Image: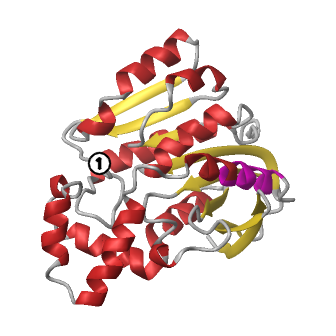
């Protein structure tokens, strides 16, 4: 399938945000849309590839760059993030949150690169992320898609890691969202769950203990509020099991998760009924 792809800018709270927009080329009918929400690394090649996969499946897909609001800071430029990601990938996952282990790895780098990488890691791993600003940018992305002449008005969200948590938060903040898929993302605050107005699908790895710890309470709160929630935990799978550019990738879990994601999207945005001819 031929795709039409471009990097766009759209307004959010008086500033400009960029995003990767992709859609099937030459389609003569309006399509539902998907907001593809980045991992902590931003809308990198993996996230843009996922957006293209949704476009190939018949959706308009937009992957906002949540670090671009008003212009990316130097420490979050793509090349700097790539360097920081490479350093973390050289360490066992358990060492990612261990500052002393990160410092040991940084000490092996040239001085200037070590300084830059330290700054980028501090920005990427900071506990005080501007979540409300990210949500504003995602709501603006939803509006951008709904006003696209090729969109039929139905917009879902699919997020990964950081974006997984934001996908559920967007469902809390935007009741008109068609569906939210959470790939190994944190659960939303309990006091916001009552505002969710769409089906939510959570996809988790059994070995992702930190994220998984919050799922039972999320599921119970969703059930108590009468919300549509399905959670799937993949045996033996770690965090980021869907990311086929990383060692965490688990093909069997990824295949099933992709099928479930497309299944939910098809349920909330069904294709036109096809009537077959009578006899031959």
The residue sitting at 65% across, 67% down in the picture is 19
* Quadrant the N terminus occupies: bottom right
Residue 92, given in percent of the width and then of the height, sits at: 14, 60
Q: Is residue 163 magenta?
A: no
The residue sitting at 63% across, 26% down in the picture is 196
Give left or right: position of 258 versus 265. left
Quickly name the residue at label 1: 239
Colour convention? secondary structure
Give left or right: position of 231 versus 8. left
Element at badge 1? loop
Crowding around mark 1 (Cα neighbors within 10 Å: few <14, some 14 to 19, many 20+) is: many
Q: Residue furthest top?
A: 224
- The answer to which of 57 and 208 lies nearer the viewer is 208
* Quadrant the C terminus occupies: top right
Compared to residue 63, the image places residue 217 above or below, namely above
Report if residue 205 is visible in the image: no
Residue 209 quadrant: top left
The stretch in magenta equals 137-146
Residue 70, given in percent of the width and then of the height, sits at: 68, 69
The residue sitting at 69% across, 37% down in the picture is 177
Residue 54, given in percent of the width and then of the height, sits at: 58, 57
Predominant SS along the magenta part: helix
Residue 226 quadrant: top right
Give left or right: position of 31 versus 97. right
Report if residue 103 is visible in the image: yes
Residue 204, given in percent of the width and then of the height, sits at: 34, 38
Q: Is residue 141 magenta?
A: yes
């Amino acid at each position: 399938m031929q795709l039409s792809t471009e990097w766009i800018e759209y307004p959010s709270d008086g500033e400009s945000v960029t995003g990767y927009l992709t859609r099937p080329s030459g389609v003569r009918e309006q399509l539902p849309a998907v907001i593809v929400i980045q991992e902590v690394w931003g809308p990198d090649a993996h996230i843009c590839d996922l957006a293209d996969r949704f476009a190939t499946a018949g959706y308009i897909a937009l992957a906002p760059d949540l670090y671009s609001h008003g212009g990316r800071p130097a420490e979050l430029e793509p090349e700097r993030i790539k360097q920081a990601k490479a350093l973390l990938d050289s360490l066992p996952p358990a060492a990612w949150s261990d500052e002393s282990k990160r410092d040991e790895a940084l000490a092996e780098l040239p001085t200037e690169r070590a300084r830059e990488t330290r700054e980028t890691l501090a920005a990427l791993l900071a506990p005080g992320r501007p979540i409300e600003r990210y949500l504003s940018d995602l709501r603006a992305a939803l509006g951008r898609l709904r006003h696209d002449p090729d969109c039929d008005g139905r917009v879902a969200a699919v997020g990964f890691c950081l974006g997984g948590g934001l996908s559920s938060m967007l469902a809390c903040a935007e009741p008109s969202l068609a569906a939210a898929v959470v790939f190994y993302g944190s659960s939303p605050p309990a006091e916001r769950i009552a505002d969710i107005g769409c089906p939510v699908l959570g996809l988790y790895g059994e070995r992702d203990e930190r994220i998984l710890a919050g799922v039972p309470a999320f599921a119970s709160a969703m059930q108590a509020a009468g919300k549509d929630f399905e959670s799937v935990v993949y045996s033996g799978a770690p965090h980021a099991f869907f990311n086929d550019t990383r060692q965490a990738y688990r093909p069997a879990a990824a295949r099933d998760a992709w099928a479930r994601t497309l299944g939910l999207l098809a349920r909330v945005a069904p294709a036109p009924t096809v009537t077959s001819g009578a006899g031959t």
